[in-house]
Image (cartoon, rainbow, N blue to C red):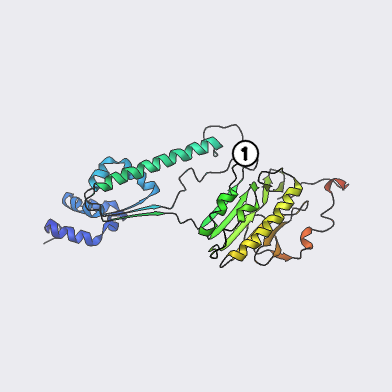
């Protein structure tokens, strides 16, 4: 007796040992013959593993929903990869050209509209799936997993927008639930590193705040410091911001249970040397660039970080030809 000659009950048991994953790996395994297909489909539909992308495809197919509904036993929805959502969007250029169809960047309003549309579609897909599952008599398990937010890399390059919201206090409330925080924003203040009220040590292991904002063009690279929230943009204000952030970083490091790295990255004027303050050791190191935020760097003395006398010379008092700040 061949496999296909077995009674349906026995053949279904055999296919059940293969499991839903066996057919999900290659859907052609469902199409041996009509009799095989009818039974194999029941096994295939028992376990659904859906992602943010496949959820929309599945719920848009009413025929597939109806066919799977009687046999669904376990469902696992994994919302981990949001790379296709508009929440992961390229930042707008500093001097954007006129908006053209097909541009690779989004205006503030277009970005918000795209996010709202994505959320609406995702909620509609989840709602449709929920309706199907309520009518599934074989359902035994439902598992929903979202991306574990233990790392929060933030970089806001829209520093020219003076009406940007104050995010520092909102971000600080996330510190107890994070393992890592990397942040560079055009407007920032020390409230970002404000630890929660005294209590258990924080599980936070790495904090890097970069106060150096690059300005790139075809001919030169320059830096300027982040602006303190709700204050005028002045050099003195930027220097005081660096000092305040370094003080807060040291206080935050003392509250962390296993601190691995606590850094505040800034630069000196006019030399534009990039330094990283270590909030754990209270020391500064000089970085070779502003790209690798966690680079080891070279340790410097406190006086050395103020740069040499030559570096502190006013650029406009020098009789030599003026060159670009830093040429890459």
Residue 211 is left or right of residue 89, and the answer is right
Quarter that holds the N terminus: bottom left
Residue 145 x, y percent position in the rendering? 39, 55
Q: Residue at x 36, y 41 (%)?
A: 124
Q: Residue furthest front?
A: 198
Circle 1 residue: 163
Left or right of 320 in this view: 214? left
Please give the count of numbered marks on the rendered protein.
1
Which residue is found at the position 32% from the left and 42% from the top? 128
Where in the figure is residue 172, as x and y percent of width and height? Answer: 57, 54
Q: Percent x, y for residue 196?
A: 57, 58
Q: Is residue 233 left or right of residue 136?
A: right
| Residue nearest the observer in this picture, 73 or 20 | 73
Along the viewing direction, whichever of 192 and 120 lies nearer the viewer:
192
Q: Residues within 10 Å of mark 1 (few under 14, many from 20)?
A: few
What residue is drawn where x is 55% and y is 59%? Answer: 180
Q: Secondary structure at mark 1?
A: loop
Point out residue 243 in the picture as x, y percentages from the top left corner: 71, 56
Q: Is residue 103 above or below residue 136?
A: above
Q: In front: 318, or 282?
A: 282
Q: Relative to 232, say whether 4 is above or below.
A: below
């Amino acid at each position: 007796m061949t496999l296909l000659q077995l009674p349906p009950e026995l053949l279904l048991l055999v296919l059940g040992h293969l499991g839903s994953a066996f057919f999900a790996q290659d859907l052609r395994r469902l199409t041996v013959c009509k009799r095989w297909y009818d039974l194999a489909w029941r096994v295939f539909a028992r376990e659904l593993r859906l992602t943010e992308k496949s959820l929309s495809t599945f719920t848009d197919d009413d025929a597939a929903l109806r066919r799977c509904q009687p046999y669904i036993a376990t469902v696992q929805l994994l919302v981990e990869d949001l790379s296709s959502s508009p929440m992961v969007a390229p930042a707008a250029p500093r001097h954007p050209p006129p908006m053209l169809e097909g541009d690779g960047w989004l205006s503030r309003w277009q970005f918000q509209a795209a996010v709202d549309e994505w959320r609406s579609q995702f909620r509609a897909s989840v709602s449709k799936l929920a309706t199907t599952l309520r009518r599934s008599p074989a359902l035994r398990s439902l598992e929903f997993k979202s991306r574990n937010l233990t790392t929060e890399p933030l970089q806001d390059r829209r520093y020219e927008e003076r009406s940007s919201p104050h995010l520092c206090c909102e971000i600080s409330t996330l510190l107890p639930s994070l393992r890592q925080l990397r942040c560079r924003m055009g407007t920032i203040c020390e409230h970002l590193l404000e630890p929660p009220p005294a209590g258990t040590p924080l599980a936070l292991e790495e904090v890097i705040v970069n106060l150096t904002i690059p300005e790139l063009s075809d001919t030169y690279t320059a830096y300027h410091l982040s602006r303190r929230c709700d204050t005028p943009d002045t050099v003195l204000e930027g220097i005081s911001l660096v000092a305040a952030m370094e003080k807060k970083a040291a206080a935050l490091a003392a509250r962390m249970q296993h601190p691995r790295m606590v850094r505040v990255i800034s630069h000196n004027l006019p030399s534009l040397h990039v330094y990283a303050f270590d909030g754990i050791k209270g020391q500064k190191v000089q970085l070779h660039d502003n790209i690798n935020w966690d680079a080891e760097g070279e340790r410097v003395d406190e006086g050395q970080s103020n740069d040499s006398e030559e570096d502190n010379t006013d650029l406009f008092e020098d009789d030599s030809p003026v060159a670009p700040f830093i040429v890459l």
